[in-house]
Image (spheres, helix red, strand yellow):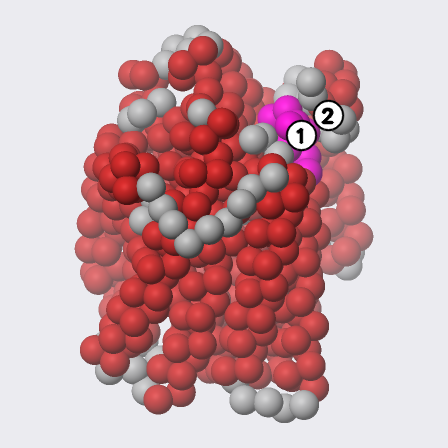
Amino acid sequence: MAYTVSQNTSLYTTASILQKAVSFIYFTIVARLIGVENTGHYFFALSFAAIFTVIADFGLAAVLTRETARYPDQTEGYLTTVLWTKIAFGLGSWVLMIGAAYALGYDPILKKLILVAGLTMVFDNLHNVFFGVFRAHRNLLIESIGIIMSQTITMAVGLFALWNHWPLWSLIAAYTIASATTVIFAAIAAQRVYKLHYRLAFDTAILKSFINIAIPFGVAGILLRLYSYADSIIMSKLLDPVYLGWWSVSYKITFAFQFLPVALSASIYPVMSSWMITNREKIGELFVKAWRYLFLIVFPLTFGLGAIAEPLIVKLYGAAYLPSVTVLRILLFSLVFGFLSFVTGATLNATNNQKKQTTLLAVTLVTNVLLNLLLIPLFTIRGAAFAALIGNIILAVGGFVLVKKTVAIKTSELWDYGFNAFWPAAVMGIAALVLLKIMNLWLVIAISVLLYVVLLYVSGGLTKELVQEFKLKLLPQRSL
């Protein structure tokens, strides 16, 4: 069972919207009930564990997807080898994470939260193996079901813990229970769909080959995760937990939409990997189309949410989180470059340029850490936001330059697509700022969305042909 890029994107995006909606509601409830300082602890424990997730994976999931997409008849051997390797890597990373928490001198409460979050990391590391196989076969249906199921379980267990006034670590344990359940679901689904046989064995030749390929992927993954969360680690040592609480709200709102480029990248990566061998000239066309889709989404998010940031945060989280407003607006501008960098990264990895991607990530990480060390003591969480903006610019622009050296890109088309989405979004944002003075928040949101769509038609950013293309491609029909 295989689906087209657009169909897979539709499946994954729909699931991610539901998952993010549930996650956002859940986090909002948690943040309001446990307070700013506890929210900071809660957010940091999950962020700290996220760093070690990529150490446990070390790029093997990406290699599994790429190689299985190229050689589908080797699915079982590849999966079995990677599965047992990642079990060992996961447990080792958990021990390493606990040691790091003690070495950094965190307080007992935070250590306990990190310990439980580490268990979640181990299980997340495993279900990604099975989902990687489905991705390789261009089937994101099972993963889409899995992410909805996981978030639903997390919310159910978490709300039960809140209702019974259980300690803070139980909210982290909700993620662990959900992740373990997802592993079981994904393993059973993969076995039934592809008639796999799991056994306690692995092929050393496959492992050696995969490790050699995975090194740049693994290093890149570690660098990217450190880049994403280095600011949180620095803030945890330089600032009070309340600042992390404010930061977490801005971060959560901004990256609630990150599933969009993730879904798109997950869909185009195996296709580009396959085309690298069979149809290389089409990679550039797919890259341009991917950026076009992202332009249509990220510009209105940046200008629209930036305009309504203050009333939105007050309504959702309360006045205690007002210091998050400025940070949110800065992070929203960084979102533009963050979205685009997902596609450049996927393209570089799919075209055997993972070493160049790793080098770019290393440069970005070093720049980001230095900026955080310089700006956080001066401007607290606003300094971290500016560092994130500069880092994302480096990733997106640098990635585009590297991609352009590998595949043919029609730059003029990209400029046209970008401009045709940019100015309608900018006008919408200005209109929203004006309307907020005379209307309530929810009415302003509705009018702004309608205005953006109308202006998008006027600019040519959205055409009848593109709408028809969405209708035809996003319907989840099987491809033969």
Q: Residue at x 53, y 76 (%)?
A: 173
- Residue at 27% over, 37% down: 205
- Of the numbered discs 2 and 1, the one sitting upstream in the chain is 1
Residue 221 shows up from this direction: no
Residue nearer the viewer, 386 or 399: 399
Amino acid under label 1? Answer: Met
How many numbered discs, if any? 2
Within-10-Å neighbours for mark 1: few <14, some 14–19, many 20+? few
Q: Which residues are drawn in magenta?
A: 1-11
Contact check, label 2 and label 1, Cβ < 8 Å: yes
In this view, 383 is above or below 416: below
Could you tell whether 258 is left or right of 234 in the image?
Answer: right
Q: List x then y, in percent, for residue 148.
A: 67, 55
198 w.r.t. 35: above or below: above
Mark 2, residue position: 478
Residue 137 located within the stretch drawn in magenta: no
Q: Quick one: 87 or 203, which is closer to the camera? A: 203
When the figure is inspected, residue 120 is found, relative to residue 412, above or below; the finding is below
Q: Secondary structure at mark 1?
A: loop
Residue occupying the point 49% across, 27% down: 73
What type of secondary structure mainly makes up the magenta span?
A: helix
Q: Label 2: state its secondary structure.
A: loop
Task: Name the residue type under label 2.
Answer: Arg
Q: Which mark is residue 1?
A: 1
Q: Position of residue 370 (x, y in %)?
A: 20, 55
Would you say 63 lies left or right of 374 here?
A: right
